[in-house]
Image (cartoon, helix red, strand yellow):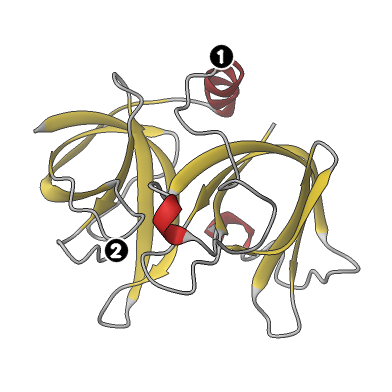
Amino acid sequence: MIRKILLLTKSSKRKNNGEFGNCVTGIDEETMEFIRLVSDKNGDSLSDDEMQFNPLDIIQCKIDGPYPIGSQVENHIVDVSTIEKIDCRDIEYIKKLYEGNKFQRKSFFGDMNDCVVDIKSLEYSISVIMVKNLAIYRDNNSKYKADFTIGNDKANNISMTDPDYYRSAKNATKSKPIRVDNAIIIASLPSNPTYYKFIAKIFVI
């Protein structure tokens, strides 16, 4: 099936062979369905050669699926030979979609914890949420993390895989983080335990 997809993430994720890859997600421009583009039925990520486009690009491509793996019900195999860029959007467009309640899921997977305990009750793995007081840093294990608030609730030590911050936050610490007042984040879940939540993309608004 040929679909037009607004790309939301191109975040870092190892391929099954250990090489660097990309977790690529987006929404169907017509149905607003969340879609995760993968290279095979096992949900393997896409290489840079397979996915040469970026968040906010609109691509047209042939996809097959879904091929769900656990909560990752959005997985679709993409025929990389059919991908073409047909348009692009800006962050203001993402904000309008959010404020217009166009996104089908606006939640940090139900609570502010850093992982999902009862994965059987959760039937999705991609969500969008507006946050405040975002702080991006590296922890004591050199892992990229983020803290943020939603209303009066706070999330701490959430994994962050948006490569746009790998350079700017390289030397950031929890006491001296990169700070963002307001953002829309794309949150995601892995396909296997432990189901730690992570921030795949940050749109500063």
For the residue marked with disc 1, what is the amino acid? Answer: Gly
For the residue marked with disc 2, what is the amino acid? Answer: Ser
CA neighbours of label 2 inside 10 A, class few (<14), some (14 to 19), many (20+): many
Disc nearest the viewer among 2 and 1: 1
Q: Residue at x 44, y 34 (%)?
A: 56
| Helix, strand or loop for disc 1 | loop
Residue to which mark 2 is pinned: 45
| Helix, strand or loop for disc 2 | loop
- In the image, is 158 to the left or to the right of 40? right
Whole-angstrom CA distance, mark 2 to mark 1, is 31 Å
- In the image, is 43 to the left or to the right of 185? left
Residue to which mark 1 is pinned: 100
Task: Specify the quadrant of the image occupied by residue 130.
Answer: top right
The quadrant of the image that shows the N terminus is top left
Q: Residue at x 20, y 36 (%)?
A: 84
Residue 136 point in image, percent of width and height:
74, 59
Residue 157 point in image, percent of width and height:
72, 66
User: Outermost residue, right direction?
Assistant: 175
Task: Specify the quadrant of the image occupied by residue 147.
Answer: bottom right
- In the image, is 19 to the left or to the right of 1? right
From what the image shows, is residue 95 above or below residue 52?
above
Q: Earlier in the sequence, mark 2 or mark 1?
A: 2
Mark 2 touching mark 1, by CB under 8 A?
no
